[in-house]
Amino acid sequence: MWKKSELREAPAPLEGPVVATITGGTVIWFVLFLAQLPFYGWFDDRGTTWWVWTCLAGGGLGLLGVWYVRRRDAAIKRDAAAKRDGGRAAPGA
């Protein structure tokens, strides 16, 4: 029996401003964290302080994501430059 995934090809990956997207999302998480801090008592009274800490965790993981996508973007550019220069290793690689 055929599986649905065997009936068609996977789509090509989307490329776009990955670094800007991850940075923007990280900023949003930190803004949400800072916006909720003045209301920490309200969250605590209702047992929902996890909202505050989720935003902080999202911002922290976003920083890790920014670091990762910046390194990935630099590696892609180094590889493209090496291919363009005839396969020679780029200086500093």
Image (tube, grey):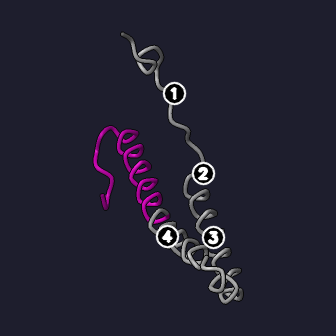
Front disc: 1 or 2: 1
Mark 4 / mark 2, whichever is N-terminal? 2
Classify mark 1: helix, strand or loop: loop
User: What is the crowding at mark 1: few (fewer than 14 residues within 10 Å), some, or many (at least 20)?
Assistant: few
Q: Is residue 80 above or below residue 33?
A: above
The answer to the question of whether label 3 and label 2 lie on touching residues, with beta carbons closer than 8 A, is: no
Classify mark 3: helix, strand or loop: helix
- State the CA–CA distance, disc 4 to disc 2: 16 Å
Please give the name of the residue rendered at 67% of the width and 75% of the height, measured from the top-left corner: 31
User: Looking at the picture, which amino acid does disc 4 mark?
Assistant: Leu
Q: Quadrant of the C terminus?
A: bottom left
Question: Residue 6, position in %: x, y?
Answer: 41, 17
Span colored in magenta: 66-93
Residue wearing tag 3:
27
Q: Is residue 35 left or right of residue 70?
A: right
Identify the disc placed on residue 11: 1
- State the CA–CA distance, disc 4 to disc 1: 29 Å
- State the CA–CA distance, disc 1 to disc 3: 30 Å
Q: Quadrant of residue 85?
A: top left
Identify the disc placed on residue 63: 4
Identify the disc placed on residue 47: none
Identify the disc placed on residue 17: 2
Question: Residue 64, position in %: x, y?
Answer: 44, 67
Please give the name of the residue rendered at 66% of the width and 68% of the height, measured from the top-left corner: 28
Nearer the observer, 92 or 6: 6
Classify mark 4: helix, strand or loop: helix
Please give the name of the residue rendered at 50% of the width and 72% of the height, measured from the top-left corner: 57
- State the CA–CA distance, disc 3 to disc 2: 15 Å
User: What is the crowding at mark 2: few (fewer than 14 residues within 10 Å), some, or many (at least 20)?
Assistant: few
